[in-house]
């Protein structure tokens, strides 16, 4: 697995959860997986060991020296250490949203070093490449290394976790990363006058997947295709949708060490303790305990539907509800959340930041969880919410549509404030009927989205790819 994120080493979103959990789940199907990850500043090398010295990446006259470390983990995790490229404050850019200007070089060196890991340390039958940051791996294998005996017969799977992030650079970037200008063509890596790293995966991987069946269909339409729907339709036969699993060892109220009290479907009493403590942690009034508490944990971006929150916050307050939100992201949306906190003091409480423990406590302490996403490839928080008896209110798109059903949550279709408010009203009405509400919570808690089914699907796909060679 070649990925720019893997929990617990480096995480900004769901990609990290997937790559952190899938290798162990695959082991049950007899598949041995290793992960290659950049060594960012936030990854401590103290418990890692150096397993390869001086793996050089040459791009024309430029030479990058990398060293490979293996981290202490249940499966091999190789860290590509190249301080000039990765010893920086963020994964992809400075905080505040500006990408690093040399991201093309950073992830090209990463891709080449990952192939070096495969050459020297871990022979792979399949390169499972995740998102644009690994998009050059299929491109290098198809070009630079097409006759290299090490990689003969190797297959590539490219998984799209979010089509909205494409790795777009000026055309000149291609030469800088040692790829031929001939790849700049519409059925190659060209995208409206620029070079697209995600198209390296889409055009040159042997197979494509994304993280839910509905999203696999949606991205082939203009509405959700971000301009790539044509390229994806051209590869429709090779594109599958495999729903992410979740790691219930991390995300279950029975065992969650981040909570002030634990609970289960059989005994929900601990959930009230979690709610009381969450209200206190956010400085909301104690007497809110009997009222619906809505929770949000999210990257604050347009994708996650902040615009719809703006149109529905008045409704939540009018229904005598409360809202707690945790997230970081684009300054404009961070400001929006600060603003509604100021507008509805004692009703709406917001934390700007990344705080895993608090994310767990919101999942446990809230009654309802809001995900009005414009699009959602899979989404993990709604699945966590089910397990915590926190009823999701979601827009019926992508993985949200595939995981939430009538009886376990509330769905709305149109991306409009009106549709969202209707769903919130329906949810608040249901909350008022305690017996019905607990039945709904328990139906959600009984759902099983563990990795087993997803790992089985990936394993079968890898095997099909390898037997086709
Ligand atoms: P995405 O990958 O689009 O961000 P997902 O729902 O697939 O969305 O995954 C989000 C993951 O990141 C979840 O594990 C969620 O708990 C976590 N997360 C997102 N924002 C924060 C935050 N501000 N603090 C802690 N965890 C967060």
Image (cartoon, rainbow, N blue to C red):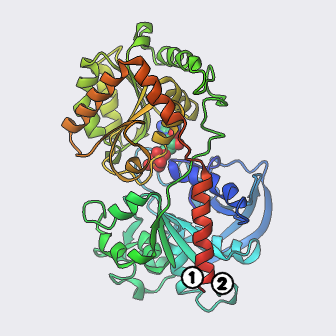
Q: Can residue 392 be seen in this view?
A: yes
The residue that appears at 46% across and 19% down in the rendered structure is 282
Left or right of residue 314, residue 406 in this image: right
Residue under label 1, please give it.
141
Of all residues shown, which one is farthest toward the bottom? 147
Of all residues shown, which one is farthest toward the left? 418
Left or right of residue 200, residue 191 in this image: left
Q: Where 336 falls versus 277 (above or below)?
A: below
Q: Where 437 falls versus 306 (above or below)?
A: above
Q: Where 293 falls versus 390 (above or below)?
A: above
Left or right of residue 389, residue 290 in this image: left
Residue under label 2, please give it.
151
Q: Are marks 2 and 1 in contact (CB under 8 Å)?
A: yes
Looking at the rendered structure, the secondary structure element under dot 2 is helix
Looking at the rendered structure, the secondary structure element under dot 1 is helix
Q: Residues within 10 Å of mark 1 (few under 14, many from 20)?
A: many
- The label shown at residue 336 is none
Pick the front one: 225 or 2: 225
State the separation of the CA atoms marked 2 and 1: 8 Å
| Residue 6, position as x, y percentages in the image | 61, 53
The residue that appears at 25% across and 36% down in the rendered structure is 420
| Residue 229, position as x, y percentages in the image | 31, 69
Of all residues shown, which one is farthest toward the top? 287
Pick the front one: 453 or 284: 453
């Amino acid at each position: 697995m070649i990925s720019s994120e893997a929990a617990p080493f480096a995480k900004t979103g769901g990609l990290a959860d997937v790559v952190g959990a899938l290798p162990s789940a695959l082991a049950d199907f007899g598949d041995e997986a290793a992960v290659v990850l950049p060594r960012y500043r936030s990854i401590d090398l103290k418990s890692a060991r150096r397993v390869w010295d001086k793996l050089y990446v040459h791009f024309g006259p430029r030479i990058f020296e990398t060293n490979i470390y293996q981290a202490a983990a249940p499966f091999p995790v190789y860290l590509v250490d190249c301080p000039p490229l990765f010893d920086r404050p963020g994964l992809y850019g400075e905080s505040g949203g500006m990408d690093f200007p040399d991201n093309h070089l950073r992830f090209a060196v990463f891709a080449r070093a990952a192939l070096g890991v495969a050459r020297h340390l871990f022979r792979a039958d399949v390169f499972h490449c995740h998102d644009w940051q690994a998009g050059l791996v299929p491109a290098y294998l198809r070009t630079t290394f097409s006759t290299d005996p090490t990689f003969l017969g190797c297959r590539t799977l490219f998984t799209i976790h979010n089509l909205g992030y494409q790795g777009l650079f000026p055309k000149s970037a291609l030469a800088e990363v040692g790829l031929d200008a001939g790849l700049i063509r519409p059925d190659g890596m060209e995208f409206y006058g620029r070079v697209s790293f995600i198209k390296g995966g889409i055009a040159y991987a042997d197979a494509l997947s994304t993280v839910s069946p509905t999203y696999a269909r949606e991205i082939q339409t203009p509405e959700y295709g971000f301009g790539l729907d044509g390229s994806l339709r051209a590869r429709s036969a090779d594109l599958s949708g495999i729903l992410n699993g979740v790691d219930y060892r991390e995300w279950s109220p029975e065992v969650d060490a981040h909570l002030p009290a634990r609970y289960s479907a059989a005994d929900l009493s601990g959930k009230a303790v979690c709610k009381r403590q969450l209200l206190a942690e956010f400085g909301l009034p104690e007497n809110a305990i009997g009222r619906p508490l809505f929770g949000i944990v999210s990257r604050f971006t347009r994708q996650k539907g902040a615009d719809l929150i703006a149109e529905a916050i008045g409704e939540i307050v009018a229904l005598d509800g409360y809202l707690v939100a945790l997230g970081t992201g684009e300054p404009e949306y961070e400001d929006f959340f600060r603003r509604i906190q100021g507008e509805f003091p004692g009703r709406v409480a917001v934390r700007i930041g990344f705080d895993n423990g608090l994310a767990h406590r919101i999942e446990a302490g809230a009654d309802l969880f809001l995900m009005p996403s414009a699009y959602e490839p899979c989404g993990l928080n709604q699945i966590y919410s089910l397990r915590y008896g926190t009823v999701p209110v979601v827009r019926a798109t992508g993985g949200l549509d595939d995981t939430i059903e009538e009886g376990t949550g509330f769905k709305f279709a149109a991306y409009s404030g009106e549709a969202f408010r209707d769903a919130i009203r329906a949810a608040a009405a249901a909350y008022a009927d305690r017996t019905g509400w607990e039945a709904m919570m328990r139906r959600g808690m009984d759902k099983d989205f563990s990795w087993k089914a997803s790992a089985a699907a990936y394993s079968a796909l890898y095997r099909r790819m390898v037997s086709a060679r």
